[in-house]
Image: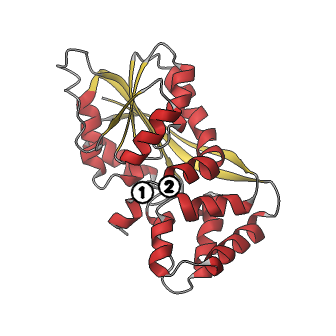
Amino acid sequence: MMASDADRRWSESMPAAYEQYLAPVLFRPFAEDLAARAAALHPRRILELAAGTGVLTSELLAVAPSAEVTATDLNEAMVAFGAARAPGAVWRQADAQRLPFPDGAVGADGGFDLVACQFGVMFFPDRVAAFAEVRRVLAPGGRFLFNTWGPLGSHAFDSAVQAGLERAFPVDPPQFLPTVPHGYADPAAVAVDLAAAGFTVEEERELTLEGRAASAADVALGFLTGTPVRAAVEERGDGPSVRAAVVAEVTARLGAGPVTAPMTAYVFRGVA
């Protein structure tokens, strides 16, 4: 199922909620892992795609302090938020399918040694085109390092939120979670797209980490206010009853109080 444009839309008020409720729980554990893998490659110049609020950016700056980090995102609100959060990087608004950088093989600066992307490739409408752009801006022998979420059922937080949305909207529930974040969960399909863009897959690994949240309600609130789920809910008639239904379902599945839950992802490393 293809995601709609609304499923990829981020408003100016979303980054703060995303950063407060979702980044520490869902994204920081995998950012630490991805940054460690990046540092092991000893890159000189790093380009980050779909950098969002700078969760991975901050980790890259910490583990590779001598590297030049350029962070990009399609959404200007995310770029503004990320630039304030991780000022050690150069931030630019950029479309991953039309990167504003010269060819890595001929550019005066020699291209990027590493392009990294934390849970962003699922948002690219044309992934092969985006991967081809990554290959274009990489220096010869450069690496493309990124991760994708596994199936929705392998992510306890996201599957609980989706169940809550289905409880709130028994007819036509929002489909952002299954179609976008978890809509690219077949490693074989990812490998095919990488090959079509001219990459050789050096590593593909399944990785399960734990997320820790102050409460299940916080996670539900993060999705309802800090992701495109917000627009989908508003289109269907947002209100206190919707939020209450989602929070109740997520809490019933994950428990009250501080919660810990498993999350599965795939990590890929391709070489140009």
* Element type at mark 1: loop
Residue furthest right in the image:
257
Residue 182 sits above or below residue 235 on the image: above
* Residue drawn at the location 40% of the way across and 15% of the way down: 44
* Residue drawn at the location 37% of the way across and 69% of the way down: 1
173 sits to left or right of 212: left
* Closer-to-camera residue (2/48): 48
Residue 128 sits above or below residue 202 on the image: below
Residue furthest left in the image:
106
* Element type at mark 2: helix
Label 1 to label 2: alpha-carbon separation: 6 Å
224 sits to left or right of 104: right
Q: Position of residue 130 (x, y in %)?
A: 28, 44
Question: How many residues crowd around disc 2 within 10 Å: few (fewer than 14), some, or many (20 or more)?
Answer: many
| Residue at numbered disc 1 | 10
| Residue at numbered disc 2 | 14
* Residue drawn at the location 53% of the way across and 34% of the way down: 85
Question: How many residues crowd around disc 1 within 10 Å: few (fewer than 14), some, or many (20 or more)?
Answer: many
- Asked which quadrant contains residue 239, the reply is bottom right
Amino acid carrying label 2: it is Met
Is residue 198 shown to the viewer in this render?
A: no
* Residue drawn at the location 25% of the way across and 15% of the way down: 109
Residues under numbered marks 1 and 2 in contact, where contact means CB atoms less than 8 Å apart: yes
Q: Position of residue 253 (x, y in %)?
A: 74, 68
Q: Position of residue 182 (x, y in %)?
A: 49, 59
* Closer-to-camera residue (204/130): 130
Amino acid carrying label 1: it is Trp
